[in-house]
C-alpha cells in the first residue's frame, strides 16, 4: 500500500524543504490538455524563448550529435570552450561551459555560501538566486529596487563582512531594465573584495552593442567576478541546457570541482559551436526582437496598458489581475507569465514572439481588457 508523505514526514533539511518550488512557464502540451485546445494553435509567450528557434546550422549539428549518443560528451568541452575564449578575448582557463547558466548559479552558491554567510540580491531578481542561496543554508538580504531599477547604492551598503555572493542581472528578469555600463563599472569597484559578484548577462545580446558592458573593463576592475552567459535565449537552444561562465581561473577552478561530470551534452556542445559561427542567424533574431519590442510597446501605450520599457526579449505590463488574466489568455490559447511570485500580482510578463504570435496575443488582450490597465 502506498503511504502519502508531506513535508513534515521527510528527513530532508528543514531549510531545503522550505524553498518554494521554481514556477516554470507552462508548456504547450499541458495547456492543450487542460483546456482541450489544439497544440498547433497555442502561442507560448511565457518563457523568454527564441521564437525563431535555433540556427539551421545548430540543427544540423544536433542531427550529427545523435550518432554519438552512446559516447560520453567531451568532459572539457574543448572546442566550445576554446571558441568562447577567442570570442571573449580571454585566456584559456577563464571560461567554463555549464548546463545552462542556472547550473553555474547553483555552483556559485555551493562554493561561496553556507550557514553564517549571506547573499545580497536585488528585488525583482531571477528566482534561482534566492533558492540557490537558501539551499546552502545561507541567509538572504533582499534590497528594494529604486522604481524598476536596481538600487546600486543600496546594494553596496547592504554588503556585510558575512556576504559571500552578490547577484546582479543586466538586463534584469523579470523587469527588463538594464544597468548602464559606466554605472556598472563604478558599482563593481565599490563592492568589497571578499564578495563574489555574479553578473548574469543571459539577455546581453538583446542590448544594442553600445550598451553592452565591456568584459575587459569589468575583469580589470574586479578579480572576484563571475560573468554568466547562456545559449538559451538569442541562440534558441533552451532545451539543450548550455551556458557558460567567465571568471579568473581561481574561480573557475572552484566551480569545476562542484560541477557534475559531463555537465554539457554532446548535442549541446556541437549546437552551441555551430550557433556561434552563424552570425547571420543571431543578427536576424536581434533585429526581430528590436522591431517587435518597439511595436508591442507602442501597442501597450496606445491601448492604455502601463508597461516597463524593456531592454530584453520580454515586456512587463499591467493588467490589474495577473493570475486571472493569464488564465483567461490561456483559455484562448495564449500562454503568458504571471509574476505574482515576485510580488507583482497585478502584472504579467510576455515574451516577444513572431509578428503573427504577437498579433494573436494583442488581439486577445484587447478583447479581455478593452480599456487597458493603469497601475494604481
Image (cartoon, grey):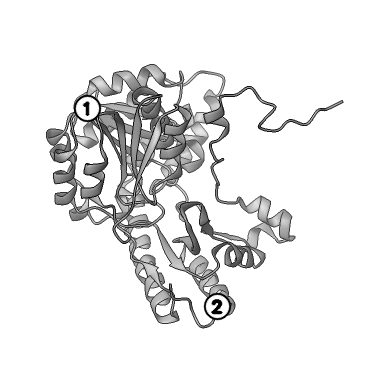
In the displayed structure, does residue 191 sit left or right of residue 59? left
- Tell me the number on the disc at residue 325: none
Q: Is residue 2 above or below residue 319?
A: above
- Which residue is under mark 2? 369
| Relative image position of residue 316 (x, y in whole percent) | 42, 62
| Relative image position of residue 13 (x, y in whole percent) | 56, 24
Mark in the foreground, 1 or 2: 1
Question: Toward which corner of the image does residue 4 lie, by quadrant?
Answer: top right
Tell me which residue sits at (31%, 52%) in the image. Answer: 171
Query: In terms of secondary structure, where does tag 2 sit?
Result: loop
| Relative image position of residue 209 (x, y in whole percent) | 21, 53
Query: In terms of secondary structure, where does tag 1 sit?
Result: loop
In the displayed structure, does residue 307 sit left or right of residue 19? left
User: Nearest the camera: 318 or 211?
Assistant: 318
Q: Is residue 43 above or below residue 242?
A: below
Quadrant including the N terminus:
top right
| Relative image position of residue 251 (x, y in whole percent) | 27, 23
- Tell me the number on the disc at residue 194: 1
Question: Toward which corner of the image does residue 17 lie, by quadrant?
Answer: top right
Of marks 1 and 2, which one's residue comes earlier in the chain?
1
Instruction: Please tell me how crowded label 1 is: few (under 14), some (14-19), or many (20+) other residues with Cα within 10 Å.
Output: few
Amino acid at each position: 500500500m502506498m503511504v502519502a508523505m508531506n513535508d513534515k514526514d521527510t528527513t530532508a533539511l528543514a531549510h531545503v524543504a522550505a524553498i518554494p518550488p521554481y514556477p516554470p512557464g507552462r508548456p504547450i502540451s499541458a495547456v492543450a490538455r487542460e483546456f482541450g485546445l489544439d497544440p498547433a494553435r497555442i502561442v507560448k509567450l511565457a518563457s523568454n524563448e527564441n521564437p525563431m528557434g535555433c540556427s539551421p546550422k545548430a540543427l544540423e549539428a544536433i542531427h550529427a550529435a545523435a550518432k554519438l549518443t552512446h559516447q560520453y560528451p567531451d568532459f572539457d568541452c574543448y572546442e566550445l570552450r576554446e571558441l568562447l575564449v577567442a570570442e571573449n578575448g580571454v585566456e584559456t582557463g577563464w571560461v567554463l561551459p555549464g548546463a545552462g547558466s542556472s547550473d553555474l548559479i547553483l555552483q556559485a552558491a555551493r562554493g561561496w555560501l553556507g550557514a553564517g554567510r549571506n547573499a545580497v540580491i536585488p528585488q525583482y531578481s531571477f528566482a534561482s538566486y534566492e533558492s540557490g542561496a537558501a539551499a546552502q543554508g545561507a541567509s538572504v538580504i533582499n534590497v528594494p529596487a529604486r522604481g524598476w531599477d536596481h538600487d546600486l547604492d543600496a546594494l553596496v551598503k547592504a554588503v556585510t563582512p558575512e556576504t559571500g555572493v552578490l547577484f546582479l542581472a543586466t538586463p534584469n528578469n523579470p523587469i527588463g531594465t538594464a544597468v548602464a555600463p559606466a554605472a556598472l563599472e563604478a558599482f563593481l569597484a565599490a563592492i568589497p573584495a571578499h564578495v563574489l559578484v555574479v553578473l548574469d548577462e543571459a539577455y546581453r545580446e538583446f542590448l544594442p552593442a553600445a550598451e553592452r558592458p565591456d568584459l575587459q573593463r569589468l575583469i580589470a576592475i574586479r578579480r572576484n567576478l563571475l560573468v554568466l552567459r547562456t545559449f538559451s535565449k538569442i541562440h534558441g537552444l533552451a532545451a539543450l541546457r548550455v551556458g557558460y561562465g567567465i571568471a579568473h581561473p581561481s574561480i573557475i577552478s572552484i566551480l569545476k570541482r562542484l560541477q557534475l561530470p559531463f555537465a554539457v551534452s554532446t548535442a549541446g556542445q556541437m549546437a552551441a559551436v555551430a550557433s556561434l559561427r552563424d552570425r547571420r542567424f543571431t543578427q536576424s533574431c536581434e533585429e526581430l526582437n528590436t522591431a517587435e519590442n518597439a511595436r508591442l510597446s507602442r501597442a501597450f501605450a496606445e491601448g492604455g496598458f502601463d508597461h516597463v520599457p524593456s531592454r530584453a526579449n520580454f515586456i512587463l505590463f499591467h493588467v490589474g489581475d495577473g493570475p486571472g488574466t493569464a488564465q483567461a489568455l490561456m483559455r484562448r490559447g495564449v500562454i503568458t507569465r504571471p509574476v505574482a511570485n515576485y510580488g507583482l500580482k497585478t502584472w504579467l510578463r510576455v515574451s516577444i514572439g513572431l509578428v503573427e504570435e504577437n498579433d494573436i496575443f494583442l488581439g486577445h488582450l484587447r478583447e479581455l481588457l478593452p480599456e487597458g490597465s493603469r497601475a494604481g
